[in-house]
Image (cartoon, helix red, strand yellow):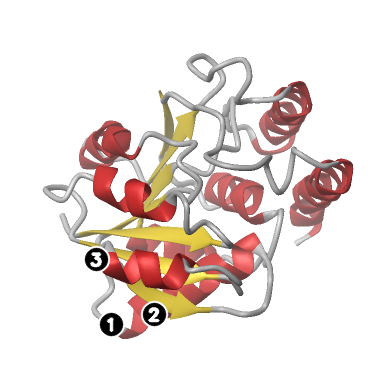
Amino acid sequence: MRVAGVIPALNEAASIGEVLRQIPKDRVERVVVADNGSTDATAQVAREGGAIVVSEPRRGYGQACLAALDYLRQNEPPDVVLFLDADLSDFPEEAHLLLDKITEGYDLVIGSRVRLARKDALLPQARFGNWLSTRLVRLFYGERFTDLGPFRAIRWEALERIAMADTNFGWTVEMQVKAAKHGLRCAEVDVRYRPRHGDKSKVTGTLRGTVGAGTKILYVIFRELLS
C-alpha cells in the first residue's frame, strides 16, 4: 500500500521539521507539504526534512490541500493519502492506527481527538463545534462521527470519487459528508492531541477564526443536502 502524506502549512517553520521526523517512514513513502504563502522558512525546513514542497499562495486550508493533491495526481498517485497538520498538534507516529484501519477495508478513517486530547489542546469552542457538526452529519447523512479532526487517511480512489472542492474551513466536513453520500466505508480511531507548537491556533485561537470556521462548516453541511 503506497501512502503519501499531505501537510498544508502556513508559517510553521518552527514545527514542520519535527512533524516530518515523526512520520513513520516505513508506512509513508513520501510527503507533500503545501506551502500556503508562508513568510518564514517553512518551505526550506520542509525540503530539508525530505518533503516535496508545492507552493500555493492563495490562502486557505482546503486550497493548500487541493494543490498537494494536484501534484500527486500528476506524479504517480498513491493508494492512500494521509492528511495531518504542520503545527505538531497531531502525533504523526500514530499514523499506523489510521493506516491499519485502511488495510482492514475502510475507505476513510478519521483520527478522533475527543477522548484523548489534552484539555488545553481542544478548546471548548472546538469541542462544541465538533459535537454540533457531527450530530448534524449523523441526522442528515446517517454516518456516525465524533470529530472533524485533520488527522485522517483516505483511499485515493475514494478521494477522487468524492471530488473535493472546498478551499478553506469546510474541507474536513466536506470530506466526511461526501464520504457518507457516496457510501464509503468510514471509521474512526482515537488519537492523541496536544496544543500546537508555538503561537495560538489560526482558527479556534481567534474569535474571527472560530466564527468563520463554524459558519463555513454549517454551510457545507446544509449545502450538500441540496446538491
The amino acid type of the residue labelled 3 equals Gly
Inter-mark Cα distance, 3 to 1: 17 Å
Helix, strand or loop status at disc 3: loop
Helix, strand or loop status at disc 1: loop
Instruction: Locate residue 222, reporting x and y percent.
Output: 82, 48
Helix, strand or loop status at disc 2: helix
* Residue labelled with disc 1: 75
The answer to whether the residue labelled 3 contacts the one labelled 1, judged by CB atoms less than 8 Å apart, is no
Q: Earlier in the sequence, mark 3 or mark 1?
A: 3
Depth check: give the residue in front, 151 or 15: 15
* Residue labelled with disc 3: 50
Instruction: Locate residue 109, reporting x and y percent.
Output: 40, 39
Relative to 84, is 77 above or below?
Answer: below
Q: Nearer the observer, disc 3 or disc 2?
A: 3
Instruction: Locate residue 140, reporting x and y percent.
Output: 73, 36
The amino acid type of the residue labelled 1 equals Asn
Q: Residues within 10 Å of mark 1 (few under 14, many from 20)?
A: few
Q: Which mark is residue 14?
A: none
Residue at (55% x, 37% y) in the render: 196
Residue at (50% x, 76% y) in the render: 67
* Residue labelled with disc 2: 71
Q: Residues within 10 Å of mark 2 (few under 14, many from 20)?
A: some
The amino acid type of the residue labelled 2 equals Tyr
Depth check: give the residue in front, 92 or 188: 92
On the rendered structure, is 144 left or right of 88?
A: right
